[in-house]
């Protein structure tokens, strides 16, 4: 096991009706806040009204900025920064999914910074100050409610880049599984694929003797695998929604990274797909991850055997470990496909004539991944594996 530092500063407020506490929690981080949300799901569900009522009864003043799109855009972040400065707002309340939260985090680091907030995403500057961010989560997926990441898309040049720093972890996250009943099946499935990807990125590591986190990863994966089909059949199943929602946070708050080094190449490869073609991140991952596995499993067949046996219940073929490893990858693909996700590039659908360019962009800052570092040609091979069976 590697040495590590782990902190989990985000206060989690989990359970039925917890959104009623939004005002009281927000009052602890700001007096005048930016109320940031997406494209309308919170109005349809009635959550908007409950949040407003809660803010008012706690005496929190707010200025609204809705309209965050999936794959959140830099231009709206810049508008949010301008609003916060003009209106002297001292915190950001994100009500929505990963896109809203990531946009809120970007605004929050941008407000005290005199330069262009995009500098933090290109690595030109490192943020040292932030105004606090609070969250009401509506979709278990990105794990942004307790993660150190924010992923923003810049329209000009179709760039999608991440900022990763502990400073941007939200102060609190209100998580009521009932808020996820309104999710369309496709969004539920995309969220599940992202949660699973966050765990698998950490699972495929070269670090030895990481038994506890291996088993935590396996348990979290199995929880998602068992409960997603339940909510697809029965969207208002509280217990199953709750398991998935908590799994989404545990998958990405870095507990499962403790003592080990994750890979993250699949995320880098996916970000090029959603940057160019604006597809849902989870759907892109469902296509990329199995292809990445097929390309890399020979690097450590035994780890893939463990994944197949412990996560998918594959019977181990001791005479032919590769066969067991490949069966685990097949089961993953079958699961993703069974919950309604694409597992091939052409199902996304995205054109397949820019694979070399995508590979080049994915490795623009150098090789990606740590389990098996990938240069451009390997990245292109994985995209090609993702095109056909
Ligand atoms: O905009 P609204 O109307 O709210 O609709 C959203 C959106 O269309 C809808 N939705 C959310 N909650 C709902 C709902 N519809 C009905 N009922 C509800 N309760 O779902 C759609 C997707 O929302 P989005 O926020 O985009 O989803 P997600 O949480 O998957 O976030 C995706 C973004 O997060 C980034 C991704 O790259 C992508 O840009 N990621 C962020 C990470 C992080 N910050 O740690 C890590 C991830 O790896 C990921 O890269
Ligand atoms: Zn992700």
Image (tube, helix red, strand yellow):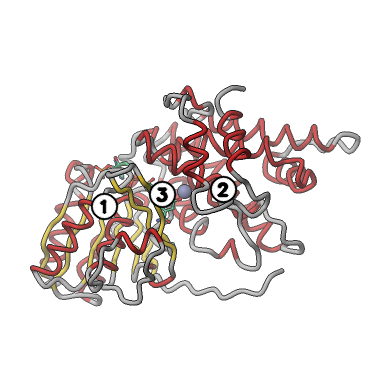
Q: Is there a contact, CB below 8 Å, between mark 2 and mark 1?
A: no
Please give the name of the residue rendered at 21% of the width and 43% of the height, measured from the top-left corner: 39
Write down the residue under mark 2: 265
Image quarter in which the C terminus is found: top right
Is the residue marked by circle 2 packed among few (<14), some (14-19), or many (20+) residues within 10 Å? many
Residue 186 showing in the rendered view? yes
Which label number is shown at residue 140?
3
- Along the polypeptide, which appears first: circle 2 or circle 1? 1
- Along the polypeptide, which appears first: circle 3 or circle 1? 1
Looking at the picture, does residue 389 appear above or below residue 43?
Answer: above
Q: Is the residue at mark 3 in contact range of ligand 1, meaning its CB lies under 8 Å from it?
A: yes
Q: Position of residue 187 (x, y in %)?
A: 38, 37
Please give the name of the residue rendered at 10% of the width and 66% of the height, measured from the top-left corner: 56
- Along the polypeptide, which appears first: circle 3 or circle 2? 3
Q: Position of residue 19 (x, y in %)?
A: 26, 59
Q: Nearer the viewer, residue 276 or 198?
A: 276
Select label 3 or label 2 by which is in front.
2
Question: Quadrant of the rendered structure where residue 319 is?
Answer: top right
Could you say whether the residue bearing mark 3 is in a helix, strand or loop?
Answer: loop
Number of marks? 3
Distance from Cα at disc 3 to Cα at disc 2: 22 Å
Write down the residue under mark 1: 74
């Amino acid at each position: 096991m590697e040495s590590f530092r782990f902190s989990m500063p985000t206060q989690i407020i989990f359970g039925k009706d917890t959104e009623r506490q939004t005002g009281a929690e927000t009052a602890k981080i700001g007096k005048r806040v930016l109320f940031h949300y997406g494209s309308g799901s919170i109005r349809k569900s009635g959550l908007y009204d409950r949040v407003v009522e809660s803010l008012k009864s706690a005496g929190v003043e707010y200025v609204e900025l809705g309209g965050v799109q999936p794959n959140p855009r830099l231009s709206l972040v810049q508008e949010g920064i301008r609003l916060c400065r003009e209106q002297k707002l001292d915190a950001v309340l994100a009500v929505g999914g990963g896109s809203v939260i990531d946009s809120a985090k970007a605004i929050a680091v941008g407000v005290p910074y005199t330069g262009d907030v995009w500098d933090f995403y290109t690595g030109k500057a490192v943020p040292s100050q932030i105004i606090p961010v609070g969250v009401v989560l509506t979709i278990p997926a990105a794990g942004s409610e307790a993660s150190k990441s924010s992923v923003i898309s810049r329209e000009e040049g179709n760039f999608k880049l991440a900022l990763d720093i502990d400073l941007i972890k939200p102060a609190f996250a209100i998580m009521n599984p009932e808020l996820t009943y309104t999710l369309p099946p496709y969004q539920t499935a995309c969220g599940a694929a992202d949660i699973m990807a966050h765990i698998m990125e950490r699972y495929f590591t070269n670090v030895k003797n990481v038994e506890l986190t291996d088993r935590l990863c396996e348990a979290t994966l199995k929880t998602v695998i068992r409960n997603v089909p339940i909510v697809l059949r029965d969207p208002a199943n509280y217990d199953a929604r709750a398991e998935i929602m908590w799994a989404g946070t545990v998958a990405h708050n870095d507990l499962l990274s403790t003592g080990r080094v994750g890979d993250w190449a699949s995320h880098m490869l996916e970000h090029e797909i959603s940057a160019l073609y604006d597809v849902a991140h989870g759907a892109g991952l469902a296509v990329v991850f199995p292809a990445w596995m097929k390309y890399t499993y020979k690097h450590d067949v035994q780890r893939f055997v463990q994944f197949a046996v412990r996560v998918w219940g594959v019977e181990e073929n001791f005479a032919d470990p590769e066969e067991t490893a490949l069966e685990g990858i097949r089961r993953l693909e079958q699961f993703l496909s069974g919950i309604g996700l694409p597992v091939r590039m052409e199902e996304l659908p995205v054109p397949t004539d820019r694979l070399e360019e995508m590979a080049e962009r994915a490795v623009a800052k150098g090789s990606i991944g740590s389990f098996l570092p990938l240069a451009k040609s390997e990245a292109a091979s994985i995209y090609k594996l993702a095109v056909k069976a």
